[in-house]
Amino acid sequence: MDWNALYSSAFEGVRGRIGRVDRVLLAYNTNIDAIKYLDGRDLRERVEKVGKDKVLRYSDDLPGRIESVPQLLGSILWSIKRGKAAELFVESCSARFYMKHWGWDELRMGGQVGIMANLLGGVYGVPVIAHVPQLSRLQASLFKDGPIYVPKLEDGKVKLVHPKGFAGDEENCIHYIYEFPRGFRVFNFEAPRENRFIGSADDYNTTLFIRDEFREGFDEITKSSPLTIISGLQALTKENYREPFEIIRGHLDVLNEREIPTHLEFAFTPDETVRKAILGLLGRFWSVGLNEVELASIMKVMGEKKLAEKLLASDPVDPVAVTDAMLKLAEKTWVRRIHFHTYGYYLALTDYRGEFVRNALLFAALAAAAKAKLGEINSIDDVVKAMDVPVNEKIKPIEEVLSKVYGMEDGITELNGYQLTFVPTKIVEKPRSTVGIGDTISSSAFMGEFALR
Ligand code: AMP
Ligand code: GLC
């Protein structure tokens, strides 16, 4: 299979037709990412200063939220030790103050909505309407120019303005992102993979605060939005999820009634009650995007413990386990499209057929490689700069398994009335940063499908 030729024609196909995507509504989480590239010596000195014993216990057991500086430093070590991403709400003022003084190397747009708004609107030129829980000046300044809008209520009417023109003086919702490369060393820990720990000093996104403009004007806002992407449910807890879920149910009523295809970006949701509640809503979405940890966490609440373990047992992830899990999820919820991404390959299960599903995945994989390589994509032509990143050779055995077990050809096969679609991805050896790649993949693939239809 000449994947490079397919990559190239998928890119040309999406670039040529991107103008056909009319408008995408993005809700709910937008924040500021303050990115700190960790330094081993600095981190060690900080741990020693607050007390190694106090810190190290949290590198074994992650706390539920950050209530002290030792918990913050211990949680960072937890991520480094495993090469795994984690994100916790920072409750304590002293930890928030500590993070602010520790500082950052870069301020970037954060949150699924913010990142997707800049990519779809600012880079691809697809008009978007975004929910921004708090529009501070700093938050507004991180939006790219282009057709990006936020609703503003004026005399009870919804007006769409660019975030920079919103003139809000609201709070800063800052997520501190501690990034480390593969092989990063501190004490006797060594990171097996590049990744990050996120401490969210943010009371709005973490509780899914929904603005009046979206409560009162939702009907109006959706009239002109043929596609929707929803995200940001992940930080809710069993104590606070009921009220925002009521609003989301109301929003889904409107979206379903208008038959607007809606994608859910399922980020890692630690609270099992919330995860079950999301599972209960999934049938009202057209599409869902997730990685192996997230798929395993859903299998767990579906009572599929063995399958959940299988999904986390090997690297690269066993594609037969992924397919079983996707089929179980589709058959339980009737969600029409499941897009699974992992390090090295993507799989999609759709209740509709066509090569455009595969081509949209290829476009997304190229965008992900460009994001990893450049750190930031500034124009659609930057995406093609990732063509020289080689297609992951380690994924050949995965492709062989799919062809043997399911008779897959050219990345496509049929299974139980669904189309199963596979693409091997391009992996950048030394990525600039890891945050936001998942959002780039999911939004590019979902939007790409509708451009190619
Ligand atoms: P998430 O875990 O949802 O943030 O998404 C991360 C995804 O980004 C993974 O599933 C990979 O598909 C992709 N990814 C991570 N690192 C790289 C890299 N170095 N090059 C290309 N894609 C990557
Ligand atoms: C989560 C984090 C946010 C980050 C995003 C990247 O939403 O809260 O800080 O930008 O993930 O995917």
Image (cartoon, rainbow, N blue to C red):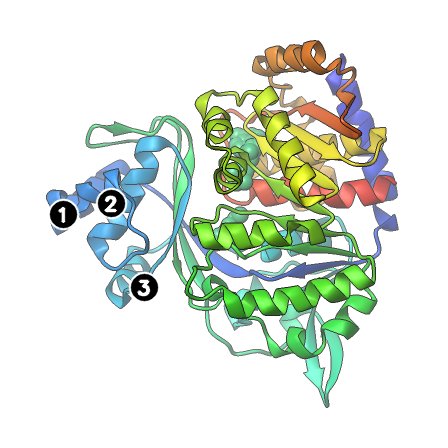
Q: Earlier in the sequence, mark 2 or mark 3?
A: 2
Looking at the rendered structure, the secondary structure element under dot 1 is: helix
How far is disc 1 from disc 3 in space, using C-alphas? 18 Å
How far is disc 1 from disc 2 in space, using C-alphas? 8 Å
Q: Residues within 10 Å of mark 1 (few under 14, many from 20)?
A: some
Give the amino acid at mark 3.
Glu
**In the visual, does 337 lie left or right of 65?**
right
How far is disc 2 from disc 3 in space, using C-alphas? 15 Å
Residue with the mark numbered 2: 74
Residue projecting furthest to the bottom = 155
Tell me residue 197's x, y (percent).
Answer: 38, 45
Q: Is residue 131 visible?
A: no
**In the visual, does 132 lie left or right of 120?**
left
Q: Residue at x 77, y 60 (%)?
A: 256
Give the amino acid at mark 2.
Gly
Looking at the rendered structure, the secondary structure element under dot 2 is: helix
Is the residue indicated by label 3 positioned so its CB lies within 8 Å of ligand 2?
A: no
Residue with the mark numbered 1: 54
Quarter where residue 428 is shown = top right
| Marks 1 and 2 close (CB-CB < 8 Å) | yes
Above or below residue 97? Residue 376 is above
Tell me residue 78's x, y (percent).
Answer: 30, 39
Report the quarter where the N terminus lies: top right
Residue with the mark numbered 3: 91
Q: Residues within 10 Å of mark 2 (few under 14, many from 20)?
A: many
Q: Residue at x 73, y 26 (%)?
A: 421
